[in-house]
Amino acid sequence: MVIGLEVHCELKTATKLFCGCPNMFGDEPNTNVCPNCLGLPGSLPVLNQRAVELAMAIGTALHCDIRASTFHRKNYFYPDQAKDYQISQYDEPLNVDGHLDLPDGFRVGIERAHMEEDTGKTTHAGTSGRIHGADYSLVDYNRSGVPLVEIVSRPDMRTADQARAYVTELRAILVASGASDGKMEEGSMRVDANVSVRPGPDDPFGTRCEIKNLNSVRSLGRAIEYEAERQIALLESGERVVQQTRHWDEGAGRTQALRSKEDAYDYRYFLEPDLVPLVPDAEWIRAVADTLGMMPAERRARLTELLDEGGGATRSQLLQVATVVELRLDDLVVEAVAAGVPSALALARTANEAATDADAARALDPKSYVELLTLEANGSLSATQAKAVLAELFVLGGGDPAAIARDKGFEAMSEDSLAATVGEAVAAHPDEWARFCEGDDKLAGFFTMLVMKATRGQANGKAVAAELRRLKG
Amino acid sequence: MAEPARLTREDVAHVASLARLHLTEDELDLYTQQLAEVLDHAADVASLDLAGVAPTAHAMAVTNVLRTDEPHPCLDRDEVLAQAPSVEDHRFRVPRILGEAP
């Protein structure tokens, strides 16, 4: 199986690529339009500087060469472009020859990452609701002219898992570079997959098919696996694969032919006469690179190092690291560890609890979060209590963890109170206590359970064990 | 630079179909001759010695014409849609499309 991916990413600018209309998803249809993005005669495109800088940021993050580039008209007749052409970069793209390293170290080459404008949104109305059999179409030009970067990988991937990992990592990089919100469900990131099969790894590439309409990482994996099996079945029955574009039908779980390359479009590309070349100099490229934050791979390495200092990361901790970085909660872990919280606790609480409401966690004052983990680390709060306080912090949107714990009555579990409860449990079960003192360690669990029951889970398990050991002498 | 191949009647028919132009047989003959003359004129450039002259993308030696990312007012939707032959649900209504977007 040989896979190459084309990812279209909408850039997070305030305005469109060539005009000052707002770049805003979900607005009322045809409210963000002007003579330019409606293709009215006499309108002229002017390139958006912010869009260029975000495209350069993507190129930098993907280790591309950033070069002098030009814009072309791609001519075709389809109502999603009112001008009857799309302005795109053709033979001189902004970013070329980069790479992306998957978390397992596998390197995927990036052929190019070029700028272009998005098309309007067509809705196919009529009986079937599908393209085929639609009676007519409705067009909303709000999206027409929204800045895009198309990232074209080399055909380096060999499994559906690698394709999934590539899109997941690319999405994280696009978000980290500030270029995109990475929302596949809103179409701000769209993936097309080129898939072919061949008998062995040293054989030449087979005929490929391009799969469109992949709206999630899950669809991507399913579609690639389906398509490879379809092609293998064709070849094994003596037929040939026809180079064509295929549409992924998520409900039916299969790909369907849309058009063959035999009747491929002739786009009559020519240089856009209304735009001049884009020539970034070294100083501009450096200035953009300086604004780039830490990339996901670096963030993962940073957390893994913290775990190494604490004795090495387990397999499940590596998954926690991936989760925390993906949700952009890793700064919280780093700050907590810097404040003295053990790395394993900081990571677990962030990956398991904070991750359930990542938006709330990111909005939280990191000081509150670190304070909460410190209270748990020093035994002032049990794990159960800490989780309850965190849930409350999310509801309130912040606050003082110690005060919230007091309000919840958690402070009653002071050392004295704990000792008293343990003492009561011991006094009520003299036989078990005697056996425990004679060395039956299993009974530690029995007493801990009694204390937990009496305190409704508010006691700190470690503190109970310590008190039992102290009483035993 | 090699002499460009002479424009054929088939080339003109192909370009016309791409541009959704329906030409009669007579028109095809006429435009093949006229367009060939235009191209012959442009081909004169090929006879010049241009070794060492960098290709230009634009008549003006200007690069990096940019605008700041600031929103401008948009057109009034009612006014925009009033220009369209057919409108439904605040969207442009267009004839049935065969196939999907290129």
Image (cartoon, rainbow, N blue to C red):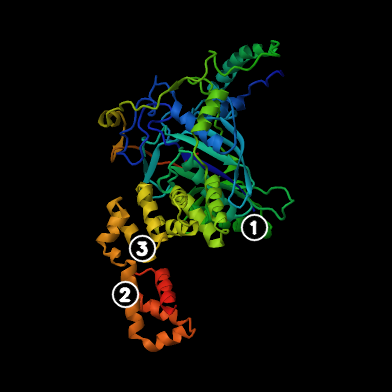
Number of residues whose C-alpha sits closer than 10 Å to that of mark 3, classed few (under 14), some (14–19) or many (20 or more): many
Is the residue at mark 3 from the same chain as the one at mark 2? Answer: yes
| Residue found at the very far front of the displayed protein | A473
Chain name for mark 2: A
- Dot 1 and dot 3 within a common chain: yes
Identified by mark 2, the residue type is Ala
Asked which quadrant contains residue A98, the reply is top right
User: In the drawing, does residue B9 fall left or right of residue A146?
Assistant: right
Among the two numbered marks 3 and 2 on one chain, the one whose residue lies closer to the N terminus: 3
3D distance between C-alphas at marks 1 and 2? 72 Å
Q: Which mark is residue A193?
A: none
Parent chain of label 1: A
Image coordinates of residue B51 in percent, x first then y, are 71, 14
Place of residue A145 in the rendered image (x, y in percent of width and height, measured from the top left): 42, 32
Q: Which mark is residue A381?
A: 3
Q: Is residue A435 left or right of residue A127?
A: right
Query: Which residue in the rendered view is the most extreme toward the bottom?
Result: A431
- Residue type at tag 3: Leu
Q: Which residue is mark 1?
A: A232
Residue A408 appears in the picture as rendered: yes
Q: Which residue is mark 2?
A: A420
Front position in the image: A334 or A163: A334
Image location of residue B39, percent across then percent down? 61, 16
